[in-house]
Image (spheres, coloured by chain):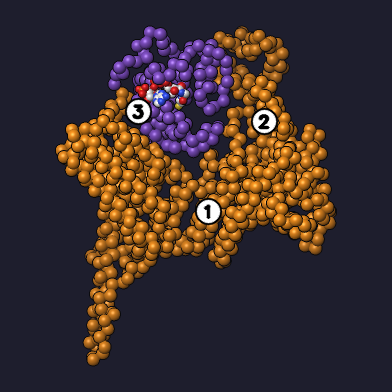
Amino acid sequence: MSDTSSDDMDEIPEEAEKEMVDITTILDDAAKSLTVSNPMLCNTDRFNLQDAMAALEVMDPKMDCCEIPISEVAPFGVKVDDNNDRLVFPRPVPTGLDDAVDPLPWDGLTNLDAAHILVENMIRLESLLGGASVVESTYTCLYAHKPVVTDMKQRLIGPVSNDDGKEKQSMKGTLAQNVVYASTLIILELTDSIRSIILNADIYEEEDFTVSTYSIDVFNDRDEGSVVNIVANTLEYMVSEVDDKDKDEVDVIAQLLKYKLDLLAMCTTMARLNGGNVRQAIEKVQRMAKQSLQALEKLCPTIERLEKRKPDSAKTTIRRVFDSHVNRPLVGNAPVRAIRFQTLPDTMSFFVKFTRDLDWALCRMLLKGDSLDRIRRMLFVISVSELNILIQSLVVLNLYFDEKIFGQHPLPALITKSMQRQFHLPDTIFNNQYSGAFITRMAKPMYDILKVMVLNRQRQRAYIDAVMLIDWTTLIQEAQLVDSALKQENPGAAPYFTLYALTISIFLMDHTVALGLELDLFCSEYEIAVVYWYRDYLLSSLITQLSTIRQLKNAHKAAEAQMAEAKSKIQRGKKKGGKHNKKAANTVALPTAEDIEDDYEFLLMNLRRGLCRGTVRFMAAVNQAGLIKEIDFEFTSKEKIFEKRFEAFQVMPQPPPLTYADYKQGSDFSSVDQKELLNSASECFKTSKTMVDKLESQLKVIDSDFVSASENDLRQLAKICVGNTIYLAKLTQMVAENGKSSGGLAIDMETSVQFCTIKIT
Amino acid sequence: MKEKKSSEDDPTIEFQDYLDESQLDAVMQLVTKDLSEPYSIDDGKPIGCVVCKIDQEEAIQNGEQRMMKTGYIGMLAVQSSYRRRGIGKSLVRKVLERMKAMKCESVMLETEMSNVTAQKLYQRSFGFIREEKLVRYYLNWGDAYRLRLWF
Ligand SMILES: CC(C)(COP(=O)(O)OP(=O)(O)OC[C@H]1O[C@@H](n2cnc3c(N)ncnc32)[C@H](O)[C@@H]1OP(=O)(O)O)[C@@H](O)C(=O)NCCC(=O)NCCS
């Protein structure tokens, strides 16, 4: 534009605001006047950085027209050398099988081609489940586009309807053609089903799911029933048509069609659970998941073989059928995330894990999670196992429906049972109006805890810190009121509700610190020492609360036994000369399976505390040996870092928040003799190792679904104990002479997700 | 904290504020080579650059909401042949000085998880902490850390 028109761009004349002016012709004229030597459409004197950034979006041809390097779309076998890798427009969306730009493989399609197309579709499906948009995953298969599906349908399906009005394939085309059609339809159906589940559950983040469909024109002339029919017919057709059923491609076609069919059935069933037969429906899905998993594991080597022997003809077909850039113009001209597809082996491993998770993390939990503490523990294990967003969404959708957890257990009843069991309390405590109301009040925050465990770790952390801790602070205050009301009625009552709410809130605090460790957010030597020191404090507080609860439980059990004994004495007195009933006397209720699970968790917490304590002392010893350089930062301070790291705990009543000064004081081992410090650190790890062994032996008597640390987790912790003990011994040797070590220090966070090995090199 | 030898004492290196778009090509070239966001531009003279801004950010403190000024470092790059001479550090220091003077409470940035060099610079030399892990943050699907320095 001319220099005069830009006199002062910041000041918009008043009439301009009122009146809209069409500047198209001005722009057109200005654009025509541009030359290669002077391509600027603006006043260069006034063109600033911000303008440049904005202009980039409209001026850069690469961004504006969505062009792509020709090497990315060249036909199979055509090599483009780097010098000739010019930009071209992506191909347009095909108008049908006989598309004018590049007709799609159809008449000459072989079964082998079809098998490879189905395999490639799995890669695209993984990409959808991995967070890519539909236009960068499902619809990179050209067969999936509406005009092509319509064309395939016209060619393959006669206008006839059978009795039930459902479409019947007339099986006009070849097997390969029918397979491609059926597979395309089921992929479209799966895509819709996956999207609706994820959207309904509404826990996705930008990185796990793309909401926009970029207005892609979808072939909607289908429904789940008709698609399932078509696929089933195709599978039948295969059985009758194919003579050589042992051929890899036939096996792959049959198994992949079956897998997609099952996947669709599993997804739709789990998305629609309700009413009375919830358990049967889940059991059916579980059986299906187990069978699919078996079939998939068996299929992997066949697919691998097929892939290795892929002929050029199949490679050419794949290149013609799949175009990753065809929808680029829909996505727009802003920088877009790179289109990314996994390798075939990674794709297959993904589906193997995915199918296993459908059984384990979804069905098994829904079937076996019968108490609040068990559900919490199962979710806790699930929360660290990197579930795919689809499974996370299915868990969330099924967490609470028909006003019950998993559609089966009313939450207030679960809470009551959990408290009853933990304290060994009689029903009477819960029949009181205050406690009843409080339990109902606790239902929502308790549901939040269960739900938060399904989120990604980073989201869990953010949500706990920003919302849940504050909620639980209020709950603790309310619990105190309930307890004092209870005490008035029953002076012997302990503060059950306060203890229960406190335990949960401290558990949450520890969980957010643990999440930070799992995410590797603490990495400097200073932060490592601080975080384990704080975690030791939190765990100690948690253990204290739990010990009180356990003591109360034992006392209640003992009192109950005494009552029973007294009762039986009276009865014995009545029935003079009656046989002495030894069994009734002094029988404290035996621990239940859940009590043993509680014991396991309690010991695990002690183990974690032991490891924290050992780490803090080891770091102090390392410091004493002169292996850590004290750093003072120019713009921040360790006090500030400490304050910000644990800021979310400021609102919590128990345990009282700590300050950097507390840390300095609490972790000051300067007055402790070096040898003694090294010994005590070493002792922490040795005691911890004993606890690991004990937990390991307990695994034999506990259902592995209900433990909060698996055998594998314990193995990791054992390595931490042993590793640190060895390096402590090494440090002890190094400092033997003059108390200082000249070695190096490396903190290994890889061995375990939450604990570290301090390596002296 | 004083460095033994700072690039700020090196007479051959001059630190300059951004003037106008005549420097833009060079800035783009510096950041293009090493950062995963797509910008491409030709030849240029500067050997290092830092691009930043100041935002108002919502903060929750003791359950109370309020606004605070937060600095943001968008890009930092030093031409490879000039690296490890303290230029990166000096650029960051200059930015932090100004942001502090302009009453920012903290400074934030994102760095690729695999970029150990940048993390060392921010964390070890300045006391930035890892505040958040950002999964698949970049256009190339790379994970990142959000780092923050609290003044
Ligand atoms: C990151 C970058 C700007 C550093 O620039 P630089 O001028 O080399 O940095 P400095 O010389 O000031 O080094 C500062 C500190 O960074 C760390 N560091 C720099 N280069 C390093 C390397 N190759 N290996 C390990 N640490 C390194 C060191 O801690 C160093 O302090 P030290 O020399 O006292 O040990 C430069 O490497 C770069 O341009 N990288 C590519 C772009 C980029 O990654 N930008 C950051 C995006 S968030």
Dot label at residue B150: none
Residue at 52% across, 41% down: A205
* Residue A176 at least partly seen: yes
Q: Kindly report the distance in space between the C-alpha atoms of the residues bearing marks 3 and 1.
A: 40 Å
Q: Which numbered dot is residue A72?
A: 2
| Residue A734: image location, x then y, percent | 24, 36
Q: Residues within 10 Å of mark 2 (few under 14, many from 20)?
A: some
Tell me if label 1 and label 2 are in contact, CB under 8 Å. Answer: no
**Chain drawn purple in the picture:** B
Residue named by callout 1: A357
Whether label 1 lies within 8 Å of ligand 1 gets the answer: no
Q: Splitting the image into four quadrants, where does ligand 1 fall? A: top left
Relative to A331, say whether A436 is above or below. Answer: below
Q: Colour of chain A?
A: orange
The kind of secondary structure element at disc 3 is: helix
SS state under label 1 = helix
Give how far across and how far down residue A126 sits, in percent: 60, 45
- Decide if residue A468 is on the left or right side of residue A534: right
Residue ID at (68%, 10%): A35
Circle 1 residues within 10 Å: few <14, some 14–19, many ≥20: many
Q: Disc 2, ligand 1: is the CB inside 8 Å?
A: no
Q: What's the residue at 54%, 39% (across, down)?
A: A206
Subunit under mark 2: A
Q: As shown in the figure, which amino acid type bears the numbered disc 2?
A: Glu
Are the numbered discs 1 and 2 placed on the same chain, yes or no? Answer: yes
Residue type at numbered disc 1: Asp
With respect to residue A575, does A736 lie above or below?
Answer: above
Find residue A596 and report its horizontal and vertical position in percent: 35, 63
Question: For the residue with label 3, is its CB less than 8 Å from the closest atom of ligand 1?
Answer: yes
Instruction: Name the chain letter of the residue that bears numbered label 1.
Output: A
